[in-house]
Amino acid sequence: MKDTNAYPDVELHEENGQTPENKDKLVCPRCGKRFEPKEKKCPHCGMKNDLMLCKVCGATMAKNAKSCPKCGAKNKKPFYKRFWFWLVVVIVLLMASCSTPKSSGGSTTADTKNEATSSSAVTSTEETVSEPQVAEEPAVSEEAEEAPTEEETTATIGEMNALRSAKQYLSAMPFSYSGLIQQLEYEGYSTEDATYAADNCEADWNEQAAKAAKNYLNSMAFSRDSLIQQLEYEGYTEEQAIYGVEQNGY
């Protein structure tokens, strides 16, 4: 009489379609052929090897699967890939860093205290020597002189370059406020840099509208209303457009 429980692993592998020769091999889900688990990809079809063998039944399963699809055994992660392991490592490292000897720290604190006392003594002697000298007004004037330079240096490199480009454009042809910003954005400047340039280029937008109206009238004939509409289309406000038209005889 055959003992069915003598070799349970062999029976389980035979149920899964595995033989003793290929029971330790993976089954490619794409081509159905077997290959060694150490292979990085299937040598038959080239599929990336993200597979593993179930430790219970030996069936092929995905490495990131929570359980074996064949026998239902849970796929336990290695201990070094679990959260609690790294939490313990971090706690141990923190405890080790906190338990380091503080003798060097004590010496440094003592040195800093000595330096602080010596510096306070030096400053006190300097104060006693400099008490008769009262000269605060030059310091105030120096701060007043330094204030404009601080305002000038608040602009970023992008803003300064955008301002330089804006002045070059205005020296070549007239622009409206919004038209200048759009042109600078087209050149690759950000909206913030282009707006900064338009705000600080010191352009008279009424005069820019008058120049634009003159250029239009030199190239073609316009009625008063159509010229105003054209200037508004270029980004000038209604008041700026009317000013520009009136400066050219309309």
Image: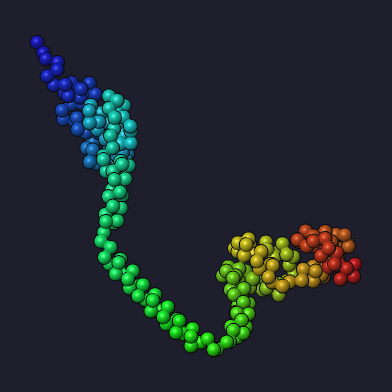
Asked whether residue 172 is in view, the answer is no
x%, y% of residue 163?
64, 71
Frontmost residue, 187 versus 105: 105
Name the residue located 12 percent from the left edge and 19 percent from the top edge.
Answer: 6
Give the quarter of the figure containing the C terminus: bottom right
Name the outermost residue toward the left: 1
Name the residue located 59 percent from the left edge and 70 percent from the top edge.
Answer: 154
Name the residue located 28 percent from the left edge and 37 percent from the top edge.
Answer: 77
x%, y% of residue 187?
61, 64
Frontmost residue, 16 versus 107: 107
Instruction: Please say if 145 is above or below 30.
Output: below
Give the quarter of the figure containing the N terminus: top left
Asked whether residue 117 is in view, the answer is yes
Q: Is residue 138 left or right of residue 46?
A: right
Name the residue located 25 percent from the left edge and 61 percent from the top edge.
Answer: 101
x%, y% of residue 106?
30, 66
Location of residue 212 (image quadrant): bottom right
